Image (spheres, rainbow, N blue to C red):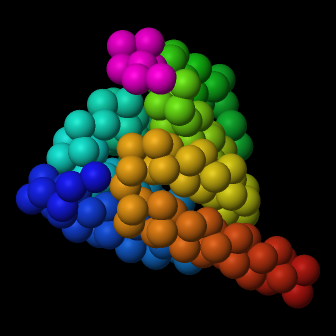
Amino acid sequence: MELTLPYILSQVFIIINYALLAISYYCKDRKTVLVISFMAVIANGLSYVFLNAYSGLAMCILALIRNIIFLIDEKKNGKSDKIYKKDIIILIILYTIAIISAIFTYEGIFSLLSVVGTMFYTYSVWQKKTIIYKFMGIPVGISWIIYNIYIMSIFGIILESILLVSSTIGYILEVKEMRKS
């Protein structure tokens, strides 16, 4: 690993990405989570461009599409904890796109971890409950830590580890708050 300008820029954008994601685990509503996640995905995509990590980049494009769909749906249909048939169809379509993207960007078995992490995260924001979103941050974090090791993103490894701790703390805090009420 050489400290080239593209590598340094990738690490700057990965820092921005993870700072935004860490903030999202402390948000109380789904819309805020989606908006912050949208901004994080853009920074993340730029980091993968600089790392030539095409599986990760494809998953960022999918994440942008996902967040736009979810934001439009929530704006059009309002906030609801209920899952409808259209929601299931949307999830199936997003998973299908993830699998197709994985086929075209396959760079080895470890590149699939970006797909797995994206699918876990997609489910976490799809299902509409912040406690499950925070819990799902744990398998998402583990998947992305291993992927960042694979693409040699030092700050990706460090910050995903911090994000994993943040999601775990966010989950524990929400469980404690639920028990109080």
Residue 36 quadrant: bottom left
Residue 102 part of the magenta-drawn span: yes
Residue 7 at x, y = what percent? Answer: 20, 55
| Residue with the most extreme right position | 179
| Image spot of residue 109 (x, y percent) | 55, 25
Residue 40 appears in which quarter of the rendering? bottom left
Residue 11, compared with residue 126, is above or below; it is below
Q: As drawn, is 134 to the left or to the right of 150?
A: right
**Closer to the camera, 177 or 159?**
159
Per the rendered image, the range of residues in magenta is 101-108
**Residue at screen point 39% across, 44% down:** 151
In the rendered image, residue 127 lying in the magenta stretch gets the answer no
**Predominant secondary structure, magenta span:** helix
Is residue 7 rendered to the left or right of residue 23?
A: left
The answer to which quarter of the image holds residue 162 is: bottom right
Q: Tell me: residue 52, above or below residue 1.
A: above
Question: Residue sitting at 56 percent across and 67 percent down?
Answer: 161
Identify which residue is drawn at 56% across, 47% down.
146
Q: Is residue 91 visible to us here? A: yes
Residue 50: image x %, image y %? 18, 47
